[in-house]
Image (cartoon, grey):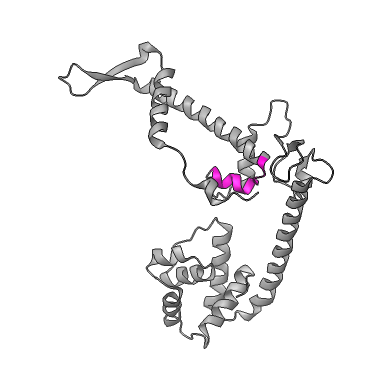
Amino acid sequence: MSTNSSTTEPTVDMIAVRQLVDRAVKAAVPAHQMTTRKIRPESDYGFPEPQPLAGLQAALAVTRLAQNQAYAFAKGLRGEGSSWDEIADLLEIEWSADYVQRERAFELVAGPVSSYGYDRYVFFTCGGSRGCGQRITDRGPFNGYPSDNEDGHAEGCRRLAAEVEAYQRAQDELEHRERVMEEALPLVTDSFGKETVQRVRYVQSHGGRYRGWSTSETLAVALVLRDNQQLEAVGYASPQEALRRIMSGMSTPPRDPAEWLATVRAAATGLQD
């Protein structure tokens, strides 16, 4: 299941949430650890408020409980058909060199490994329009085929079949792009183009993070990745304007800038114009 925009749009009443959190924190603090915050020092009126240490401890406890509740709902989404990539996005797990985002999402939702040393599991009922209704044991997105990660699907489960088909399409696309990159790389002969290929691959492997490159270097990477947001951040409103800036800084610009860009893009990403 693809999580569409309607499921990711903010639907939470934050005013109500703040009020509920405030009440929950105060309810968790013993009466003798409450104090009164006066409106003004000379005022006879004030508001009940936890003492700082007690308030901090209560707020952290509420946070942990709310986080566990979020993970429980994430299991429900998994049952409805959301992938671990989609759940990682919903949990707002940022890129890190220390983990793969979808794997980190699984680890958080599954919880810590038991004291007996068993592996982590997530259990859900195979739901959604294609679900088989069986109880599934999910070992996480660590292997290749979905059928290697999930046990319990009924014979001929349409949801599992769709996941396997999607995985195979992704693998075929990856192999195709690797062939394109291998064929296009020798066609990039100028030093700036070769360096751009390496910079693009750096950004791709580091969660979209750019380094402190020069304006032309950053523009070249953004153009290859079709990253209009980055172009605007550097101060360029259109790809054409950015490409002209890059060409003006090259000692020997190519005769066909658009073809040069397409070749670099193919060599760096495997995508063809």
User: What x and y, as percent, mark residue 165?
Assistant: 76, 55
Q: Does the magenta stretch include residue 1?
A: no
Depth order, front residue of 88/152: 152
User: What x and y, as percent, mark residue 200?
Assistant: 55, 66
The residue range painted magenta reads 80-91
Q: In this view, does 153 lie above or below 233?
A: above
Residue furthest to the bottom: 255
Q: Is residue 229 above or below residue 257?
A: above
Depth order, front residue of 95/27: 27
Asked whether residue 100 is in view, the answer is no
Tell me what residue is drawn at x 60 percent, y 79 percent.
188
Asked whether residue 33 is in view, the answer is yes
**Magenta-drawn stretch, dominant element (helix, strand or loop):** helix
User: What x and y, as percent, mark residue 101?
Assistant: 60, 47
Tell me what residue is drawn at x 50 percent, y 71 percent.
223
Depth order, front residue of 269/215: 269
Q: Does the magenta stretch include residue 83?
A: yes
Tell me what residue is drawn at x 42 percent, y 18 percent.
27
